[in-house]
Amino acid sequence: MINHDIVIIGGGPAGMAAAIAAYDAGIKDTVILDREDSIGGILRQCIHNGFGLHKLGRELTGPEYADVFAKQVYERGIKVYTETMVTDLTADKVVTATNREGILKIQAKAVILAMGCRERSRGALNICGSRPAGIFSAGTAQKLVNCEGYAVGKRVVILGSGDIGLIMARRMSFEGAKVEAVCEIMPYSGGLTRNIVQCLEDYNIPLYLSTTVAEIHGKQRLEGVTIAQVGPDRRPIEETKRYIPCDTLLLSVGLIPENELTRTAGIPIDPVTNGALVDENRQTAIPGIFACGNVLQVHDLVDYVSDEAEIAGNGAAAYLKGELDKKATVSTKAGYGVRYVLPQTVSALSDKPVSLFLRVANPYGKVRFTVKSGDQVLATAVRLKAVPGEMEKINIPAEKLALASGEITVSLEEL
Amino acid sequence: MIYDVLIAGAGVVGGMVARELSKYKLSVCILEKENDVAMGASKANSGIVHGGFDPEPDTLKAKLNVAGVEMLYEAADQLNVPYKKNGSLVCAFGASEEPAVHELYERGLINGVKGMEKLSGDEARKIEPRLSEACTLALHIPSAGIVCPYQLTLSAIGNAMDNGVELKRNFEITDIEKTDLFTVTSYKGETVQGRYFINCAGCYSDEIAAKAGDCSFNIIPRAGEYLLLDKTEGETVTHTIFQVPTPEGKGILVSPTADGNLLTGPTAAVVETAENTEITQNGVDTVIKFAAKSVPSVQFRQVITSFAGVRSSEKNGDFIIEASKKVDGLVNVAAIDSPGLTSCVAIARYVVGILEDIGLALDAKDNWDGTRVNTHAFREMNDEEKDAYIKANPAYGKIICRCETISEGEILDAIRRNPKALDVDSVKRRTRAGMGRCQGGFCSPYVMKLIAKEQGIPMEQVTKKGEGSYIATGKI
């Protein structure tokens, strides 16, 4: 057993930013454990641009954005264990990991969970038909194309309009593949508007809403799919079925936070975000264990991941310095039109402003968000448009937060 | 080369026959049309070791099932294939279904099944708390168990190969000529010759028999669809929960698997050919509806994959295991549907008896070794043992499949050990890499690279499951 002050599980954008923040807050014995051969996480395969506009004020590719942070990690001499997979975490912060040197056991004083998320697979969808080669989750295809340098098909249908699927529609087009259709089972897309414009519309790729892949055909390699419109019950409508020949089906049907270790440690999970329940420091229900990034809530912008990770990194450092005494916590609640609010608890005695992150339940036009505690309005924010695919952030000034007397509710009204 | 015995089909029956024959000084060759073993019904069934109450008394099924249970557990022990004697419950839901439980109990007594007991609904719920409140009577069979059917098959064949049996893959038989010898030709034009021919070709066994000149039976392929749930749901039930047959259907089971998942299914639909392994909306709906009848709390949101297997049945309902009356030297081992997995070792020994009856000389080898290295040994170690093992074999410290925690060392072992994994799905069946909740999303590119490197082939030639199932379509 070895000891470290802060152990960060995962060296993607969340883990890197958390490590830098914790180090800069004075905790030098901070280490990162990552299962890949270098840090950077999924950014390493996201070779498209669009990263960093909010956080860094410039537009970078995924690897470039990762490099900005990786450089800072190495400049500080923060220890990184690569090709090291954490297999167990206990509530008293014993981290067990495996690498080529053996089994590593670390007693940590604080732990930051930054394991990211995984893609929902075909298996979870119960799509009818056969099980040939040529069906990929969008991220797997992205890895094969961008990191390994292999094409994965020539005629493509994409199920799900999540951002990775949209990005891959454009990427496959670049490589000479014909993207026949993007099908989205919901009546609206879950992706960023800019991706729908830049990845589909600019390439004349049709997006079919309220449409799904009903059947998969082909014995060895995919030969085609049957797509169909869905009814209100989201089941295919027989009369609308049509066959599209294709050799590749990409799935971009949702991301699931990878919280196996969180559950192992006995940390309570929010059933809506599928991530840990946290306070404004991103501390979970177990003191000294923090969470940030896509393992906490699935983000659409890496910039927000970095912000959230800095909160967690600073939180872990403050915890070690004894500056985090829990006081007068109130819970947050999703009101009308809001699907969830994070963090789920906030200290009303905080002397710092707090940002609430949330997603709306449906697509809306112009809305006003109101943050209330009892009759007290803590903050309002107007947006010209609010969609489930884009995370919203609302700031509560410290002086307003002090007025909170009980549960804080965020709701919206359509304007 | 003229083999003493040719076996058509590398399923669990062909594999166990091969393993039994490997005990003797014989040259044996298995001919398999797919790129791996266990590619038919042996890879997609319920994985249940049945107690033996179900078959009609005095049938081959009754005899070989009851005799086969202990033989199967013994073989699994030797081959290091994990199994669990978790017991099964056959449940009646309401008075109208209860007579069937009594009937199965009586039938079980005639068949010689030991240890059965009838439980009231409340007694059954005491040992299986999430069983539906609607269950009023249940038959408890403690000797029943669960085993991974493809793990059993590939271990049997690997062990047979270690004892000298040959395996020819991608050998789809197009022609069988019988003179003194069987001359068997594949669709690629390869030929092999043998003195005896054992037909274990599953759903194709009628076609194979006909090619050899015996048209005495017809196989009815019957598809069964399943939904497999995440390991998080694996403890929903501990027993295998059956339903008594009703006018609505044969019933759907809810069972833990030997690997710790939860399995629900199968449906039973007559299909045109064994290639009909599609999932249907009707099948999925049926599984969900009937599984909920037994265990209302099954969390179908946690389904990680669905699949279908095609079982071979015959109109008389019994196994067909006999020396052909039309073709000397041909032994048909056909219509092996449930309880075929339970009976596989008993079937294999029965087949060896038939071969001896029709003139095959059996001369035991001195050096036969029926054991197989435990390929899952690493994952069963504690942390200290793992640490020591990794220090000696660093590849075991590199985790490739994060959902199931499978290391590079285990994957390389699967690619190198008999029967060698040649494609991505074969690695999955041997190691479980890609079988977890992400279904290969993260690990498949790594597995592809390991296969390409070990076999010395380019990535574009790595397949999912053999010829035509290419994954990468070219270099960028």
Image: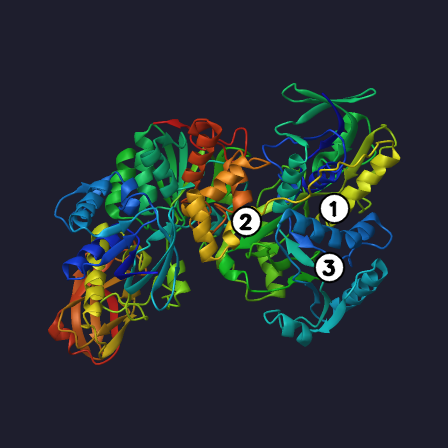
Local crowd at mark 1 within 10 Å, few (<14), some, or many (≥20)? many
* Residue type at tag 3: Pro
Q: CA distance from mark 1 to mark 2?
A: 22 Å
Q: Is residue A238 left or right of residue A158?
A: right
- Which subunit holds the residue at mark 2? B
* Residue type at tag 2: His
Q: Nearer the viewer, mark 3 or mark 2?
A: 2
State which quarter of the image contains the N terminus of chain B: top right
State which quarter of the image contains the C terminus of chain B: top left
Q: Position of residue A311 (x, y in %)?
A: 20, 62
Q: Position of residue A8 (x, y in %)?
A: 28, 57
Instruction: Describe the element under mark 3 as helix, strand or loop.
Output: loop
Q: What number is the disc on residue B345? A: 1
* Depth order, front residue of B452/A171: B452
Q: Nearer the viewer, mark 1 or mark 3?
A: 1
Q: Residue at x 52, y 54 (%)?
A: B380
Q: Provide the residue designation for mark 2.
A: B376
B401 shown above or below A311: above
The answer to whether mark 1 and mark 2 are in CB contact below 8 A is: no
Going from N to C along the chain, the mark reached first, 1 or 2, is 1
Q: Provide the residue designation for mark 3.
A: B245
Residue A132 visible from this viewpoint: no
Q: CA distance from mark 1 to mark 3?
A: 27 Å
Instruction: Describe the element under mark 1 as helix, strand or loop.
Output: helix
- In which quadrant of the rendered view does residue B314 lie? top right
- In which quadrant of the rendered view does residue A248 lie? top left
B239 shown above or below B306: below
